[in-house]
Amino acid sequence: MFGVEPICRVLSGHGWKIATSTYYAAKARPASARAVRDERLKGELRRIWDGNYQVYGAYKMWRELNRQGILVARCTVERLMRELGISGARRGKKVRTTIRDDGHERAADLLKRDFTATRPNQRWVADFTHVSTWAGVVYVAFVLDVYSRAIVGWSAATHKRAKLVLVALDMGLWRREVAGQAADASPREQT
């Protein structure tokens, strides 16, 4: 659309003094040793990536290149894979365990971020997380005694409804009753 000379004139008018011969010299200059090696490595990367069902990431590509006697830094493999637009297979998808709803009132912090206890069964805390399996995602809830940091109740399910945590809490209450340990008040009654 525009020639080299008008572009250089405009750049010179804005304080960037560039001679037209500089552009032509750069264009005629042979490729650097790094550029030549990068092009050769890109071919090798593409060959290895395609030969391994397009699942290898940078680490496995780097290891395979070194096994084949092509010594290269891992950061170079990462850079060239980015330039080629190839990447390794990523397993699964990101799982969100908590989805915030601003329309509902947030639960009060009954412990006021004080996770200490002077005796067993004084304070319990609950949390849940997910575990990725071949069959899908499993959500696991834990109830811990703050004093001993022991898991007093747990539950696993394929859903993340409130029942998941309540079943873990019921298990903790049941285990405490079976062991004959009484507390001032049930952790469930405090909430």
Image: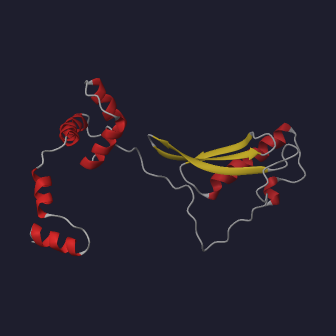
Place residue 21 in its image quadrant.
Answer: bottom left
33 vs 173: above or below: above
Percent position (x, y) of residue 136?
A: 46, 45
Percent position (x, y) of residue 62?
A: 32, 33
Q: In terms of depth relative to the viewer, which is nearer, 119 or 29?
A: 29
Tell me how many marks there are: 0
Q: In terms of depth relative to the viewer, which is nearer, 59 or 145?
A: 59
Quarter of the image where the C terminus is located: bottom right
Percent position (x, y) of residue 39?
A: 18, 41
29 vs 5: above or below: above
Instruction: State whether residue 83 appears in this view.
Output: yes
Q: How is the image coloured?
A: secondary structure
For image coordinates 84% across by 37% down, the residue present is 179
Q: In terms of depth relative to the viewer, which is nearer, 69 or 189?
A: 69
* Left or right: residue 36 compared with residue 153: left
Percent position (x, y) of residue 120?
A: 85, 43
For image coordinates 22% across by 34% down, the residue present is 51
For image coordinates 21% across by 35% down, the residue present is 44
Place residue 78 in its image quadrant.
Answer: top left
* Left or right: residue 178 compared with residue 139: right
Instruction: State whether residue 85 appears in this view.
Output: no
For image coordinates 71% across by 43% down, the residue present is 153
Quarter of the image where the N terminus is located: bottom left
